[in-house]
Every structure is written in structure tokens, then in C-alpha cells.
Amino acid sequence: GAVVSQHPSRVICKSGTSVKIECRSLDFQATTMFWYRQFPKQSLMLMATSNEGSKATYEQGVEKDKFLINHASLTLSTLTVTSAHPEDSSFYICSARDRDRYYTFGSGTRLTVV
Amino acid sequence: TQLLEQSPQFLSIQEGENLTVYCNSSSVFSSLQWYRQEPGEGPVLLVTVVTGGEVKKLKRLTFQFGDARKDSSLHITAAQPGDTGLYLCAGADGTASKLTFGTGTRLQVTL
């Protein structure tokens, strides 16, 4: 089956630094990738949608200058949390959608900002 | 904004009991998916329902899509500790451009 690899699985960074999270579709081409944020014991909240070669579409309330998304190829999207603060600590999950509109999720990245 | 409300939010039952989780919305979805998520992991797809009134079975799990494609239910028969997790419904809009996730139901099954 389709596999999406998300890396790193856990990251701890100092306040004010930037962190990059990678999302790769290993055995299929992802026309669209999605980035979600999940707080403890809550559901997934969509942050942004990215299509290969074009600018990401951000959901209302999500700062595009803080959460930089790059979708340079059909198999790779990256999310960079810039100037991270403790309130950015969360579980970030990516999802890739193939041409048949089937969604596959990564295993998530636990970000802790200290 | 499309909202998907799940009920109950939390359910703690003993092994062998049956349960139903509901997913309701005022919006119509082209399809609805159910996922199960374990702590520290991404959600894993259980089923996709597309047709209004559709019923799908996956071993002890039965999924139903409402006739109007606005709601869905998940019924688990004879729950087992391995069923413990966060259950999420997610609706796809007409163009299936993105998924909207429900509020989630946390299930705990004890021996």
C-alpha cells in the first residue's frame, strides 16, 4: 500500500530557532499534500494545502510567514516552523493525496519548543 | 465552514460490550472516511463510504453513511482492548480538495 514517510518523528528546539519537517510519498506521486496540527486529546486541524509547484493555500488563522510550506516535487513537501515559540509545540501530521484522491497520512512529528 | 461533530467525545467500556459512535454535520459530503489513531501516530484509514445509506462492515466494525450524506455512524460489536484509540470521521467536499476532520471520539476498552 501507499506509504508516507514523515521526518523527524520527534524534535526539540530552542525558542527562536526554525525547524523543518519533511513529508515524502515513497511509492506514489502526491498531487496534493496537506499539513495538519493536533493538540493533545484533540482532533486534526488543517493548516494548509500544497500542490506541487505552486504556493500553498493556508487555512484561516494560520500564519503563512510562520509556517512555510514548500512542495518542490510530487513526492516531497516540507513544513518549516520559523522563529518557533513554546506555543508552537504540537503534533504535526502530513497527508498526501494521489491522483485517485486516496489520502495517506504520515506518522507525525512531535515538536517541543523550549 | 464545514463542521463535523462526533459523539460521544469519550467512551470507556469493558471488553465484550458494544458501542456506537456518531458523526454529524449540517453539510453534505461527497464521501466520508473513518480513521483510527493511536498516540504518537498518524491516523489510519478504516473505511470510506460514498453512497447515501451505504453500510460497510469490517470484521466487528459496521459503518453507515446517512441517506442525506450528512452523517455517519460506527458501530463496534464485542469491543476488545485492541480497539482502544481515537476514532475520527472525516468528510470530503464535492471536489474532494480536502478533508474536514470530526471532533474525535476517544475509546478506551478495558479487560
Image: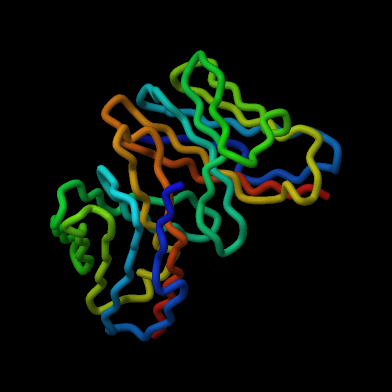
Furthest residue in direction top, as rendered: A53
Out of A3 and A18, give the one closest to the viewer.
A18
The picture places residue A56, in percent across and down from the top left corner, at 55, 25
Query: Relative to residue A56, is residue A94 depicted above or below?
Result: below
Query: Relative to residue A41, is residue A97 depicted above or below?
Result: above
The picture places residue A20, in percent across and down from the top left corner, at 68, 31
The picture quadrant where one finds residue B97 is top left
Specify the color scheme: rainbow
The picture quadrant where one finds residue A6 is top right
Look at 42% across and 33% down and name the residue there: A96
Q: Quadrant of the image for the N terminus of chain A?
A: top left
Query: Relative to residue B110, is residue A101 depicted above or below?
Result: above
Out of A12 and A113, give the one closest to the viewer.
A113
In the rendered structure, the answer to whether residue A93 lies left or right of residue A105 reads right
The picture places residue A9, in percent across and down from the top left corner, at 60, 44
Look at 86% across and 37% down and name the residue there: A16
In the rendered structure, the answer to whether residue B52 lies left or right of residue B18 reads left
In the rendered structure, the answer to whether residue B24 lies left or right of residue A84 reads left
Out of B72 and B25, give the one closest to the viewer.
B25
Q: Could you tell me how many numbered marks the image carries?
A: 0
Look at 61% across and 26% down and name the residue there: A69
The picture places residue A109, in percent across and down from the top left corner, at 60, 44
Look at 39% across and 85% down and name the residue there: B111
